[in-house]
Amino acid sequence: MAEVLVYVDHVDGAVRKPTLELLTLARRIGEPVAVHLGPNAEEAAKVLAEHGAVKVLAADAPEFTEYLVAPKVDALQAAYDAVSPAAVLLPSSAEGKEIGARLAVRIGSGIITDAIDLEAGDEGPVATQSVFAASFTTKSRVTKGAPVITVKPNSAAPEAAPAAGTVEQLAVTVADSSKGTKIVSRTPRESTGRPELTEAAIVVSGGRGVNGAENFPVIEALADSLGAAVGASRAAVDAGWYPHTNQVGQTGKSVSPQLYIAAGISGAIQHRAGMQTSKTIVAINKDAEAPIFDLVDYGVVGDLFDVVPALTDEVKSRKG
Amino acid sequence: MSLRIVVCVKYVPDATGDRHFAEDLTVDRDDVDGLLSELDEYAVEQALQIKEAADDAEITVLTVGPEDANDALRKALSMGADKAVHVEDDDLHGTDALGTSLVLAKAIEKTGYDLVVCGMASTDGTMGVLPALLAERLNVPQVTQLSEVSVADGKVTGRRDGDTASEQLEAALPAVVSVTDQSGEARYPSFKGIMAAKKKPVESLDLDDLDIDADEVGLAGSWTKVDDAAERPARTAGTIVKDEGEGGKQLAEFLAGQKFI
């Protein structure tokens, strides 16, 4: 069976959920071979093996953290040369897309980004994408070379599929030309303790109606009662009420959770582009004419400062 | 020596319009008004700020696209760019990201450059891979997704805000940079700028000028193929209630019914 390379996204060996989703999708088109760059490959390999990785190609080099992107492209290319895979899958993060794009040029392959589903097809893997602010769904293929495809988080439910997950060291030589962009310093983001926005099963977002950074704790309290991530509309982010890393929309994150709760968000195209594919959508807004109500499964026309705290209390008491 | 800045821009269908696909499954660019991709305005703005901070710099704005894409160039020129290059050729219709990066890279080399500035993604394709593709093809450093950028002493520095960390980056010129919508509000063209833009030179290039074979680009030469594009069915109308004091409770009932709580 043809092998499929899966680029592992991890934090010091802790494999992030989108990688497990990639392994599940990879099994539809071949045998997953994981590529783990950085420390703690043995630890990661256990989780990767549980989800179907037959092999884990591991490499660690100081260049991966000293220089931007290009050294990882060198490593992934080494894995590609070693395996000659039928496809290469990466997470649709900013870095995942950049690594995939550069690899595609080097190996003469086409690239598809932001797939939300992947299936085997007669002429190679078929990727489903959601485009034009999620108003269209397309099906596409790579027609030259081994397909390079980046997949959005929450595109598949990770399945257990125990496999060998044998760790093999990958020999990587980082080219001098890949050391062009130095990472001079790195400031880790403080953890909020909440789920990652793009990976969360539930997202609670606040918009213009939240009316100030000092009111966002109302949104956070509901999110915490549900174990949800917190999002914000562009209006709220541009006003400086909430960090840009939490922005949901065309120029922020695109999310596809099981449940999306929009509070005080009118639902401009910019925002809809980032949340329209959510399974269940709920909105709370003062304005009965707000376009967000066109999308909802359940909407409450009312003041979010009444409805959201009441909902938070209800959730808490029901969860006991 | 003058700092040569090339800003890559894209002419896109207006995101607030009714965007759809043409019969050959390429983006329909005829029935929807086009404009300079909003995210590229940030690239033009940062290029202008870099020029203002430099002793001597010249900004060339570059696009690949149909005749109408000239509008995007004019907008960038009216914001303050010095000159423009428009790569236009019927054989380019349907070119994908890899093909576009090939054409842009050749045009950038022909123009001459010390710094290439791009937006973070287009507002139509939204792939966000072009800056990385250009860095790979031009074999120069990739300094991308910057929320802050500056150029001094032959080096570009900037801040890249990622999900897990914020990184300070540095590279020697020549380099490819992309900037995010957090890099600073783009200026509006002044009346004077709009008038001046009419007199600024726009050079037109075709595939022959760039030594690119027609079969390397266009729909047939694409590295990818769209087999199907279907309009997403409208979401079925949901239940909407007015809060009469029980809104929170009603919402909790709904969520419990859906097994979220």
Image (cartoon, rainbow, N blue to C red):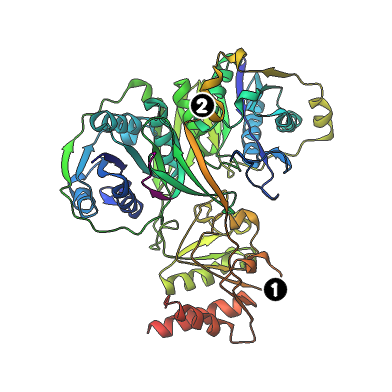
SS at mark 2 in the image: helix
Of circles 1 and 2, the one toward us is: 2
Q: What residue type is labelled 2?
A: Gly
Query: How far apart are labels 1 and 2 at the CA level?
Result: 49 Å
Q: In the displayed structure, does residue B191 sit left or right of residue A207? A: right
Q: In the displayed structure, does residue B25 sit left or right of residue A122? A: right
Who's the residue at 60% across and 66% down the image?
A: A295
SS at mark 1 in the image: loop
* Residue A247 visible, this orientation: yes
Total tally of numbered discs in the picture: 2
Task: Please name whichever residue, B21 or A169, is drawn nearer the observer in this view of the structure.
Answer: B21
Image-quadrant location for residue B121:
top right
Which quarter of the rendered picture does the C terminus of chain B lie within? bottom left
Who's the residue at 49% across and 57% down the image?
A: A255
Q: In the displayed structure, does residue A79 sit left or right of residue A157? A: left
Label 1 sits on residue: A288
Q: Which amino acid does label 1 sit on?
A: Ala
Q: In the displayed structure, does residue B17 sit left or right of residue A175? A: right
Who's the residue at 56% across and 72% down the image?
A: A297
From this view, report whether residue A228 is shown above or below residue B44: below
Q: Where is residue B146 in the image (x, y as percent from the top left)?
A: 52, 38
Task: Tell me the magenta residue range.
Answer: A117-123
Image-quadrant location for residue A284:
bottom right
Q: Where is residue A202 in the image (x, y as percent from the top left)?
A: 45, 66
* Residue B153 visible, this orientation: no
Which quarter of the rendered picture does the N terminus of chain B lie within? top right
Query: What mark, if any, has residue A42 been given in the picture?
Result: none
- Within 10 Å of disc 2 (Cα), the crowding (few <14, some 14-19, many 20+) is many
Q: Position of residue B141 (x, y in %)?
A: 45, 25
Task: Please name whichever residue, B142 or A57, is drawn nearer the observer in this view of the structure.
Answer: A57
Label 2 sits on residue: B221
